[in-house]
Amino acid sequence: MEPIKVQSEGGLNVTLTIRLLMHGKEVGSIIGKKGETVKKMREDSGARINISEGNCPERIVTITGPTDAIFKAFAMIAYKFEEDIINSMSNSPATSKPPVTLRLVVPASQCGSLIGKGGSKIKEMRESTGAQVQVAGDMLPNSTERAVTISGAPEAIIQCVKQICVVMLESPPKGATIPYRPKPASTPVIFSGGQVRADPLGASTANLSLLLQHQPLPAYTIQGQYAIPHPDQLSKLHQLAMQQTPFTPLGQTTPAFPAGLDASNQASTHELTIPNDAA
């Protein structure tokens, strides 16, 4: 493939698709009220901007179109993020403005070309644009793509994106690419005051929560939506469960506490002696 040269007006005569990885708050900023912001971005840039669906902490924003349209869309996104940063600083004591940050999703087979031999290409991009560029060492989960993070002023980010596009055109991906798809957010298990809260249908977790109120355990294993005690704690839990008295017996004002638990608030104690031969 012949190298693609940047035209004098700063554009390329090709169509590209660039994928961005954004957090929910960033996506909300791009969409705007009733979708007005993203609609204006589409109209003014001429690029197609699609946002992945789903209740996910991360979303994929896909920008497709002629390179000039893509650069305009990137410029609008970068300036919108800068505006958000300035607005957030109005209620903050911070004096230095943090940089705008965008995360591109790039096929791993193209990342070597972005880095260059001995890091020469990525160093050149940093020096010529003033933006910070970092290529993730690991691929995103269940994909063959990596995250490329660009930070800096909006102008620096736009120039950096232009150079990245040139490199990606000169070195197309090799083989099939498995795209990264963010997973939906699962119901979290919350530890609070020694209790475990989870799906109300998880009866076993609810029982575990009752036991942990009295005897906190040092370690848990998270399996799906449930908190499972570490294997070496199972015997302790079993013993504690056998001792647990869920209801107060008739005629007894205070429930009996199992041995080894704090009984400082107990109003009275009861002793029962069993002969050895009977035991």
Image (cartoon, helix red, strand yellow):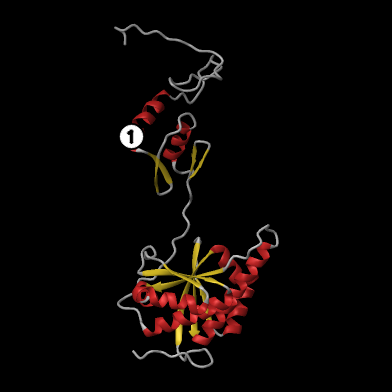
Given residues 122 and 92, the one toward you in this image is: 122
The kind of secondary structure element at disc 1 is helix
Q: Quarter of the image containing the C terminus?
A: top left
The kind of residue on which mark 1 rests is Asp
Left or right of 106, for residue 40: right
The x, y position of residue 116, in whole percent, is 36, 76
Would you identify the image quadrant in which residue 238 lies?
A: top left
Work out which residue is located at the far bottom of the displayed protein and give it.
8
The x, y position of residue 198, in whole percent, is 48, 44
Q: Quarter of the image containing the N terminus?
A: bottom left
Residue for point 70% across, 62% down: 90
Q: Identify whether 33 is placed above or below 166.
A: above
**How many numbered marks does the figure carry?**
1
Given residues 120 and 223, the one toward you in this image is: 120
Residue for point 43% across, 21% down: 260
Location of mark 1 (residue) = 232
Q: Identify whether 172 is placed above or below 100.
A: below
Given residues 51 and 127, the one toward you in this image is: 127
Residue for point 48% across, 19% down: 256
The x, y position of residue 132, in whole percent, is 49, 71
Work out which residue is located at the far right of the displayed protein and give it.
90
Left or right of 95, for residue 17: left
Q: Identify whether 132 is placed above or below 237.
A: below
The x, y position of residue 156, in whole percent, is 55, 77
Residue for point 37% across, 65% down: 137
Are there few (<14), some (14-19), or many (20+) residues within 10 Å of tag 1? few
